[in-house]
Image (cartoon, rainbow, N blue to C red):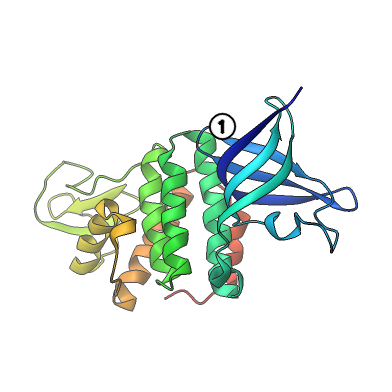
Amino acid sequence: MPQIKKIEGIVIGDTNYSESSKILNVLTKDYGIIGIISKGCRRVKSNLRTVSNKLVYGDFNIYYKENGLSTLISVDVKRYFKNIMTDIVKISYATYLLELAQQTYKQNTNNDIQDLLLSALNKIEDNYDPLIITNILEVKYLDYLGIGLNVDGCNICGNTSDIVTLSSKSGGFVCRNCYTNEKIVSEKTIKVIRMLYYVDIDKITKLELANQTVKEISEFLDEYYDSYSGLYLKSKNFLKTFTNEK
């Protein structure tokens, strides 16, 4: 018989089920990604209607079933992310981050993946630049995907000085001695991507970067993910065509 449990998590995906229900994919700390059926939630008068959507974060009261779909009873919501949900650009970035977190968690079940996701969503909700926040999360998730960047020296020889560019082809930093014909990025971009790797998202209080720096970092990360992650994310392709990236 299923047990009643309260599980903290965030809805990272939802799929219509039957005429009036949904299946929610919820990223949790203690149980990983679990499937929860929200019965009748698509009915206008359902008490579950507003809590059965992507980006709902809270404590999920469920009839827990270990090897199948759990059933939703109620949700004690901690944050709705209303600001994101009413802004088409923000929700496009957030949707991508949910899919990225889901795919990252499938390869590495570290609890930090959920913590980092929530930190990034909180900053976007609080009106920090969604592209820069997305780049920060992309940089941090590389370690969990097993393709982490070496931001302390040349990726080819290990030299810690005289870094001249950032190259996806070379897997990261390239020093002057190892440089061949890689695209040159600005010195500022080299410094900033190292900062993004080490920064605590929760402690960010100011986030202002030159458009050129953001553009170079975004282009590098797109190429790096395409080359090494093996991920194909529909939401990323939509984001590229829908938004005007800096």
The image quadrant of residue 129 is: bottom left
Q: Quadrant of the N terminus?
A: top right
Where does the image place residue 8, in percent across and percent down from the top left?
Answer: 55, 42
**Looking at the picture, does residue 18 appear above or below residue 201?**
above
Q: Classify mark 1: helix, strand or loop.
A: loop
**Viewer-side residue, 132 vs 39:** 39
The residue at 51%/39% (across/down) is 105
**Viewer-side residue, 178 vs 245:** 245
What is the three-letter code of the residue carrying label 1? Answer: Tyr
The residue at 36%/49% (across/down) is 140
Residue placed under numbered mark 1 in the picture = 31
Residue at the outermost left position = 161
The residue at 39%/45% (across/down) is 142
Where does the image place residue 74, in percent across and percent down from the top left?
Answer: 69, 47
**Looking at the picture, does residue 108 appear above or below residue 8?**
above
Around disc 1, counting alpha carbons within 10 Å, would you say few (fewer than 14), some (14 to 19), or many (20 or more)?
few
Residue at the outermost top position = 1
Would residue 230 be seen by someone viewing this image from the given angle? no
